[in-house]
């Protein structure tokens, strides 16, 4: 009937208490690191993924730009042809003109001078297309006009062309027809004062002078486009939308009708 030694439950109680302590320890230690690791891992993955995507998109964009530049840089230069101008005109006017009006824009081959085959300097090209320049220049006496007009994409390029045509021009009077540092009224006065044989400039300023009545296109015999030259971005003048638009507007201000009447010839340098 008496309780045996150690039968008061002290060792069992101690075992129970010890078991309770181990259970508490497991509850405190086991669940805490597990969720923290699980929650950290997806957060790290989530942060890394968008960075990789952004890097990929920027890399592909840069590569595309380089490819375009590389193609232009490595492509062999092809001389401009009359068909190139005709095609650009059709593309430009196709959405604005009827079929009949588009046909009227077509210029016969007789309107075009021999195109530059990329072996010429400006002086040698002008001598080839106009071998009788000296005689033609002497017979020119009309003010507010020129006999030969060279159209390019910028004022800087116009100055380069003027310097490179010294062998051709001789004693001919040359006028700069661009907007940089020169007001329209100054150019109008110069054209009114003296007889000028050669004009070099940009289509926008030439167009403005014609609009204001300071420049007459009728005596013009040669219109030469600086067609093949490329700027630092490898663009030709007709690759730039603003200049292309101004060129076509200039052509419509009497140039096309003069070409069709065969009093004016077009050249692509």
Image (spheres, rainbow, N blue to C red):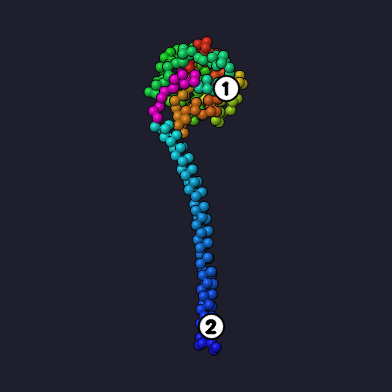
Query: Residue 3: x, y in percent?
Result: 54, 87
SS for dot 1: loop
Q: Is residue 84 magenta?
A: yes
Quadrant assignment, res 193: top right
Q: Quick one: quadrant of the C terminus?
A: top left
- Which residue position holds label 1? 95
Q: Is residue 161 above or below residue 131?
A: below
Measured as percent of width and height from the top left, residue 187 is found at 57, 24
* Residue shown at the point (49%, 52%) measured from the top left: 48
Question: Which comes before the other along the chain, label 2 or label 1?
Answer: 2
Measure how far apart labels 2 and 1 are at the Cα level: 104 Å
Quarter of the image with the N terminus in it: bottom right
Magenta span of residues: 75-87
Residue lying at the far top of the rendered structure: 261
The residue that label 2 is drawn on is: 9
Callout 2: 10 Å neighbours few (<14), some, many (20+)?
A: few
Q: Crowding near pointer 1: few (<14 within 10 Å), some, many (20+)?
A: few
In the image shown, does 95 or 25 lie closer to the viewer?
25
Q: Position of residue 169 (x, y in %)?
A: 44, 20
Q: Which residue is at a point 52% across and 12% down the rendered structure image?
A: 260
């Amino acid at each position: 009937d008496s309780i045996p030694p150690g039968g008061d439950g002290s060792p069992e109680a101690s075992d129970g208490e010890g078991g309770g302590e181990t259970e508490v320890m497991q509850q405190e230690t086991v669940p805490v690191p597990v969720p923290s690791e699980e929650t950290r891992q997806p957060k790290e993955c989530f942060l890394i993924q968008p960075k990789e995507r952004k890097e990929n998109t920027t890399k592909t964009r840069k590569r595309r730009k380089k490819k375009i530049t590389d193609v232009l840089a490595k492509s062999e230069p092809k001389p401009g042809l009359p068909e190139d101008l005709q095609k650009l005109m059709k593309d430009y006017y196709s959405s604005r003109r009827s079929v009949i009006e588009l046909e009227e824009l077509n210029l016969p081959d007789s309107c075009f001078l021999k195109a530059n085959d990329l072996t010429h300097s400006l002086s040698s090209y002008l001598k080839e297309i106009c071998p009788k320049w000296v005689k033609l220049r002497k017979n020119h006496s009309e003010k507010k006009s020129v006999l030969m007009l060279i159209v390019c994409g910028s004022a800087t390029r116009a100055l380069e062309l003027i310097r490179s045509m010294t062998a051709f021009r001789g004693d001919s009077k040359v006028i700069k027809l661009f907007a940089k540092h020169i007001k329209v009224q100054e150019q109008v006065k110069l054209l009114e004062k003296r007889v000028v044989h050669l004009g070099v400039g940009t289509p926008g300023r030439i167009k403005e002078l014609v609009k204001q009545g300071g420049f007459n296109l009728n005596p013009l015999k040669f219109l030469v486009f600086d067609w093949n030259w490329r700027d630092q971005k490898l663009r030709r003048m007709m690759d730039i939308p603003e200049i292309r638009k101004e060129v076509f507007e200039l052509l419509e201000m009497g140039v096309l009708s003069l070409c069709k009447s065969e009093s004016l010839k077009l050249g692509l340098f």
